[in-house]
Amino acid sequence: MNILRQILCEFSQIEPNLLWVAFELSGYGDDFHGFEALELNINNQILKNPKYKDSTENPFSGSSNLYNLTFFQKFDNILKKDSYQEALISALLPTGVSFKSVDCGACSGVLLANCIPAFSDCSIEIKKEFYSSLWRSTVFRLNKGFKGFLLNFVNSEQFGSTF
């Protein structure tokens, strides 16, 4: 099984009703900081990582907030596996393109994992105001039947190019 299918399989083991999950990615200089789960969609209910939510807006309260943060971290932990991270990056990026930026450069963006085939053509928007100021709102357009990964990122050393 290829790495992308394996990751989707592990996501569905955490939550069988997961439709999609969005991750932030970032790096500075020669360091890639990895992926962090921002939002996920379970049965058409979008949940935002409680780490980024104002407590007055958070749909989770009290001790359940810690539980939900742990829930998001389970997805992070899959992508943080050493055996997965390099293979995932290699599978996603074209030859010669890198998340790493030498000197003072930086990269930032969003990775979307669509876990089930899209029912119809649709768009998924991840809005920046909840998360990092390094990237603008990102809109992913999915065609009917699409299942897999979509990536949008900027590497400042590549003249602001977006992939």
Image (cartoon, grey):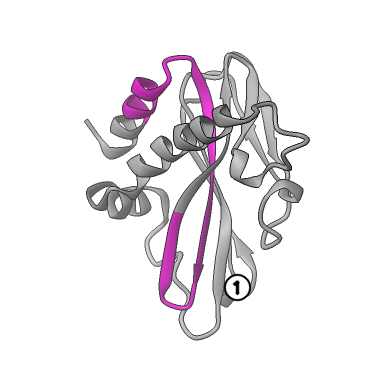
* Vertical position of residue 103 compared to residue 120: above or below: below
Is any part of residue 19 visible from this angle?
Answer: yes
Residue 114 percent coordinates (x, y) = 50, 29
Left/right placement of residue 77 relative to residue 38 reads left
- At 43% from the left and 20% from the top, the residue drawn is 15
- At 59% from the left and 38% from the top, the residue drawn is 49
Specify the quadrant of the image occupied by residue 100.
Answer: bottom left
Residue 48 percent coordinates (x, y) = 63, 35
Q: Is residue 16 rendered magenta in the image?
A: yes
* Vertical position of residue 125 compared to residue 101: above or below: above
Left/right placement of residue 50 relative to residue 83 reads right
Which residues make up the magenta segment? 8-34
Specify the quadrant of the image occupied by residue 1.
Answer: top left
Element marked by disc 1 = helix
Name the residue beneath numbered marker 1: 156
Is any part of residue 153 visible from this angle?
Answer: no
